[in-house]
Amino acid sequence: MASIHLQNIEKKYGAFVGVQNMSLEIADEEFLVLLGPSGCGKTTTMRMIAGLELPTGGKIVIGGEEMTEIDARDRDVAMVFQGYALYPNMSIYENIRFPLRMRGIPKAEHDARIRQAADMVELGSFLDRKPGALSGGQRQRAALARAVVRQPQVFLMDEPLSNLDAKLRQSMRVQIKHMQRQLKVTTVYVTHDQIEAMTLADRIVIMNKGAIQQVGTPDQIYSDPANTFVAGFIGSPPMNLIEGVAQNGRFVAPGVTAACPGYVQGRVTLGVRPEDCHVGGDNVQGMVYGVEPTGDTTYLTVLAGTKKIEVKAAREYRSDIDVPISITFDPAHLYFFGEDGQRIRGAA
Amino acid sequence: MAKARKSRGESMLLRYLVLGGWALVCLLPILWFLSIGFRPRTEVITPQPIYWPTFSLDAWHLLMSDWPIAKYLRNSVIAVAGSVVIDLMLAIPAAYALARYEFKGREDIGFYILSTRMMAPAIVAVPIFFLFKTLGLLDSVWALMLIYAAINLSLVTWIIRSYMLDIPKELEDAARTDGAGDLTILREIIVPACLPGIITAAVIAAIFAINEFLFTLLIASTSNAYTMSVALANFTGGSDGIIYNAIALVSFIAFVPILILVILIQKHLSRGLTMGAVKG
Ligand SMILES: Nc1ncnc2c1ncn2[C@@H]1O[C@H](COP(=O)(O)OP(=O)(O)OP(=O)(O)O)[C@@H](O)[C@H]1O
Ligand SMILES: [Mg+2]
């Protein structure tokens, strides 16, 4: 329906910078996920795209038209709000109908559309209730239905599934993705849930403190992190980040040694994912600190010096604590980051 | 260990006793003048205490035949109801602007509006008299309507504004992204969401207007525009002395509309209506 270009947008609240110098090109029909810790500016970014917040700098272009100062009602954007924002005096039916009425959709179509949206979020039997008489998860689904009942230029979804149980969340996720592919509406989606981000996104934007850390496909974000923030944020448990010193192709930290490329020199951080660590071998000499069976895998925490290293061990692995253990790293999946936290890449 | 906790029944009983006692204290004067109103005139003024009063409709008949109560009531209702309607029509948009729009001096303007309420009414009594005289509105219900509206406008605006401030901003944001304009948002989202506040403000304004005395006395020079409050004050029972039981009855009749309004306000005082709009 529409591409979105954010050009150096910035939002300051007094001296506090909510979003800084953010540039992003969102392609038509793309599903883009914003991921980042609480307070990093995700909602603020969404509100600027929706036209509810005026950026203090930069330009917003939607569908080729400059929209920076255009009012929200003239942007043809549908948003799911983090706090739901259901109209308390209207029934769920009327809530979902509101955007249809406001956008002048012919009356004859209303009922069918409302029921279709409500069925999608499995709220068909709650249509005549007021929002106050619904549970948190039901309200959230009603908010989602209200957003998807019409076909706008852009969907903005601010944590639309955060309050649902795991099973419902999974089925909603599939529904949302299916619907987005079907309607081909450009979508910006905020979540804290990495699985949601990985499964839904065409591309993921990782944000921290109001700034973009990395933009990429889920694969790129996972297997090619740009800095320690992204590396430590993605994956559960996230990548082990071990500070040490590299010299002449050798990385050394208390209890840890590993081979490293010759161009990695000085004080660096070694990153290695838990699934690339294996019991046995000679990269880490440490003690077992804890063992956590989860059913399909066992997480093993190894104490090397003062550093705790997470290892994804075999399902049936068990051990007492405080016994010596050694670990090897998969040499093909080691990452090195410089003192500034940025990835050190080869000259090639 | 054996120190028994108070059972639920016991504490409920205590609660009812305390509250019931307090209610009795509050209601006693009202019941008292109601009882005076329905006693014969002679019984009201005897010095001996009377334990079993006789029931009599004397005062009622006197009122119905000698005193144009219907007219006073009608004047009151027109002036009060009209003033409340005027207040709401002006106050709702004003309160919305004060609660939501960003403009320079917003807080100051809000305070100026409220400060008109703080002035002693006597200060403006004379100018108001001349103003209405010039307008040819003396001794008219319409004049009372305007005055009541003016007196209460600031308070009504302020009450409604405070309710509007409690409405989550996200609701309006949602309506805006759904495609609603300012007036639609006001009509379909804001007004319903702060309806309890609007009703509260309207009832408070109505009570103030019903009891308004100074300006009514000033403007209503004949029984033409008398409202209940002024008629009541002028009422002594007619040509043959002060008739206390009739006065008591009139007072009770004047009190009934206020009672009804208070019962109404009580039902709507709860602010629960915005519940469920927003998470948590
Ligand atoms: N109106 C405001 N005035 C001042 N600061 C604000 C305002 N709105 C947001 N902020 C600040 O801007 C930052 C970004 O807020 P935002 O709501 O975008 O975070 P978020 O990434 O959506 O977080 P969460 O995941 O918790 O929802 C926060 O530090 C917040 O305190
Ligand atoms: Mg947020």
Image (cartoon, coloured by chain):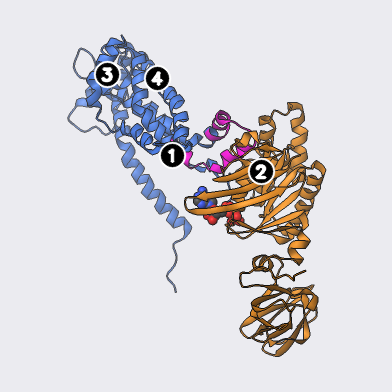
Distance from the alpha carbon under mark 2 to that under mark 4: 47 Å
Q: Which type of secondary structure does the marked residue at label 4 adopt?
A: helix
**In percent of the image, x 76 and y 39: which residue is there?**
A1
| Quadrant placement of the C terminus of chain A | bottom right
**Which of the two discs, 2 and 4, sits closer to the camera?**
2
Look at the picture and state if A28 lies above or below B77: below
The tint chain B carries is blue
Per the image, is A156 magenta? no
Q: Between disc 4 and disc 3, whose residue precedes? A: 4
User: Residue A341, labelled with which disc?
Assistant: none
Per the image, is B175 magenta? yes
Q: Do the residues labelled 2 and 1 touch (CB within 8 Å)?
A: no
Which span of residues is magenta-colored? B161-190
Label 4 in the same subunit as label 3 = yes
Q: Mark 1 lies on which chain?
A: B
Would you name the residue on which mark 3 appears?
B128
